[in-house]
Amino acid sequence: MRKIVANLFVSLDGVVESPEQWTGPYFTEEIGQTIGSEMAQADVMLLGRVTYQTFAASFADQAGGMADQMNNIPKIVVSTTLEAADWQNSTLVSGLAELTAHKEKNGRNIAISGSAGLVRSLLREGLLDELHLLLFPVVVGSGKRLFHGIDGQLSLSLLDSRTFAGGVVQLSYQPKR
């Protein structure tokens, strides 16, 4: 069975919104290689509406390198408000229940990049298998936070950790069930 694995950039104060505005000074070739390795372990991307629309606007009309990878990988978009998912290789689903069938198919991981609201929903429903965070040594102060709206305690087990030059830390967790 496939795993659903979320990969997110997060600040020390828990902000996940607009990482392009605060990760730059800390981003290294080694971090880029780590992200590439995470992407290589997946053969499907799972996206919420906002991230899907952002990525489609950024990559749909581009070619080469990362754009080719993003355009060619199958994408599952979870949204109750989108009427269509027109970006190449995209499938629209309206609810989390439909993801179980995708997890049961043969293949590599189903990767989430960004989509914090979707990640929270998957955590609440027990559908997220792993949470991989790149924790950046910056306090952003405002913006959407990863665990905003999570009621009660959420226990996670640390699977792995790694520290990069510049103070970025990669943390990999598995939800306790």
Image (cartoon, rainbow, N blue to C red):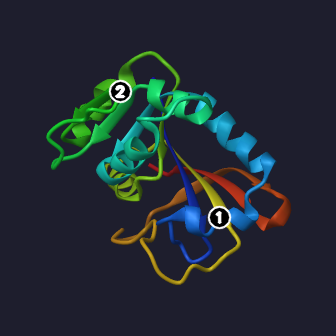
Kind of residue at disc 1: Thr
Q: Residue 66 at what x, y percent from top left?
A: 59, 35
- Element type where label 1 sits in the image: loop
Residue 26: quadrant of the picture = bottom right
Q: Residue at x 79, y 67 (%)?
A: 167
Q: Identify the residue at image location x=65%, y=64%.
A: 23
Q: CA distance from mark 1 to mark 2?
A: 28 Å
Q: Dot 1: few (<14), some (14–19), or many (≥20) neighbours within 10 Å?
A: some
Image spot of residue 139 (x, y percent): 62, 80
Residue 74 appears in which quarter of the rendering? Answer: top left
For the N terminus, which image quadrant?
top left
Circle 1 or circle 2, nearest the eye? 2
Kindly give the residue lying farthest to the right in the view shown. Answer: 165
Q: Is residue 148 above or below residue 43?
A: below
Which amino acid does the dot numbered 2 rest on? Gln
Give the residue number, with chain letter if any, for mark 2. Answer: 88
Does dot 2 land on a helix, a strand or a loop? loop
Badge 2 crowding class, 10 Å Cα cut-off, few under 14, some 14 to 19, many 20 or more, is some
Query: Quick one: 123 or 73, which is closer to the camera?
Result: 73
In this rendering, position of residue 24 left or right of residue 50: right
Q: Quadrant of residue 20?
A: bottom right
Left or right: residue 30 compared with residue 13: right
In this rendering, the answer to whether 12 lies above or below 61 is below
- Residue shown at the point (58%, 59%) measured from the top left: 9
Mark identifier at residue 23: 1
